[in-house]
Image: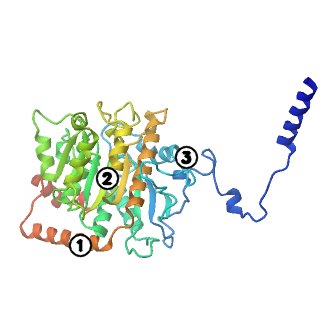
Amino acid sequence: MKVAGFILGALIQFSLTEGHVEQNENANLTEMWGEDWPFSGIQTFAHLPHHKCLIDMEKKFDIGVIGVPFDTAVSFRGGARFGPQAIRKASQRQTSMRGFNFRADINPYQDWASVVDCGDVPVTPMDNCLALKMMTAAYENLLSHESQTSDNNLPPRFVTLGGDHSIILPALRALRKTYGRLAVIHFDSHLDTWAPSKYPSFWHSDTSEFTHGSMLWIAHNEGLLTENNNIHAGLRTRLSGSSFEDYDDDDKVGFHRIEADEIMDGGIKSIVEKIKSKIPSDVPVYISVDIDVLDPSAAPGTGTMEVGGWMTRELIRIIRELEDLNLVGADIVEVSPPFDPTEITSLAGAQIAYELITNMVKKGPIDPELIKHNLELSDKLTQGQQLLGFSSPTDELNDKIQKEQFVLQA
């Protein structure tokens, strides 16, 4: 009996090491070598094909992932310049072969859309004014591409991996030219609609006006946002002074607010209903996710943590419920890997990017007629405001901007 067992074991070992390996003689090289394991291959997002979209203008695609490694507009901890690399690394268990989203009932990497990784914008860390110009030019370049979708004359859509939150401003500037004014859904623990004069410093310069807390104030002043269809969700930061003055200023910028605590009263359903009640079905939408909307236990790797936030599961469910919106762009920002050796923050960022791509794919191509209509309305609104002498929230700073012609004129 022992001899028979020994012989059987030897035969099994021989078959595993020396046995016949079946090969399909008709297989092509892509079938043989085209699929990566999570730990193999160059680290693009979700193993997507890499294209230098800022250089190769002939390439057509429908959705691009673009990294913007910029973090010198922060007010506390840095490190978000390493966010794009970290999110890509955390996405390596995502592949087109294993990308089916059970929550949405589609595989966004195997559906109608051509999805690619466009690499990074090589933005300077030396000069914020120059960086803003570079990022704005980069987004305009990206939006000059043609979509692969034959029946759609609109450009590809992009999911941006930040980078600090200031990168939303150049994105909105470029998108405004293509889509008209945008409704912004802003997942964040902070308002980010502070006028630059709110920061506690006597000293100001061209660079100091452009920060990761003032960019939505600037976007409103430049006429990039819809007037009353913008949402903050997940708020829980401390406010200035001894009153709700920050909220009063926020009202003037055109945002509605959902505080993080509201999820305890009405649950996820109430959050989704409140968001949808403020977003018309015929406007283009931009979703911006500051990773600090999550509780520090779920996302410790970020620059300005606030306790009492949402969990990753809750945020994913909320995003999934927004899949019927006209999503024309999105970002995941403020992922700072140096503060999270466990990589759970980057993993959350990669999952959120996957959900946002899923939303774009499941909704399908954007209707060009809807965008044409929105552009016309946006231009009429801007012209009307100019005729009426419309002034933005902080007139004193606007006067200063016009006189000194600094960063907002970049």
Residue furthest to the top in view is 2
Q: Quadrant of the N terminus?
A: top right
Q: Tell me which numbered mark, 1 or 2, is placed earlier along the sequence.
A: 2
Number of marks in the rendered image: 3
The mark that comes first in sequence, 1 or 3, is: 3
> For the residue labelled by badge 3, is the local secondary structure a helix, a strand or a loop?
loop
Badge 1 crowding class, 10 Å Cα cut-off, few under 14, some 14 to 19, many 20 or more, is: some
Q: At x 34% / y 39%, what residue is drawn?
A: 314
Give x and y (percent) for residue 196: 20, 47
Give the farthest residue toward the front. Answer: 1
Q: Residues within 10 Å of mark 3 (few under 14, many from 20)?
A: many
Specify the amino acid type for callout 2. Leu
Residue 322 shows which numbered tag?
2
Q: Position of residue 112 (x, y in %)?
A: 47, 65
* Side of 141 relative to 172 (left or right): right
Residue marked by disc 3 = 92
Amino acid identity at mark 1 = His
Mark 1, residue position: 373
Q: Nearer the viewer, residue 15 or 278?
A: 15
Q: Amino acid at mark 3?
A: Gln
The reply to whether residue 139 is in sight is: yes
On screen, residue 11 above or below 36:
above
Above/below status of 117 relative to 153: above
Q: Secondary structure at mark 2?
A: loop
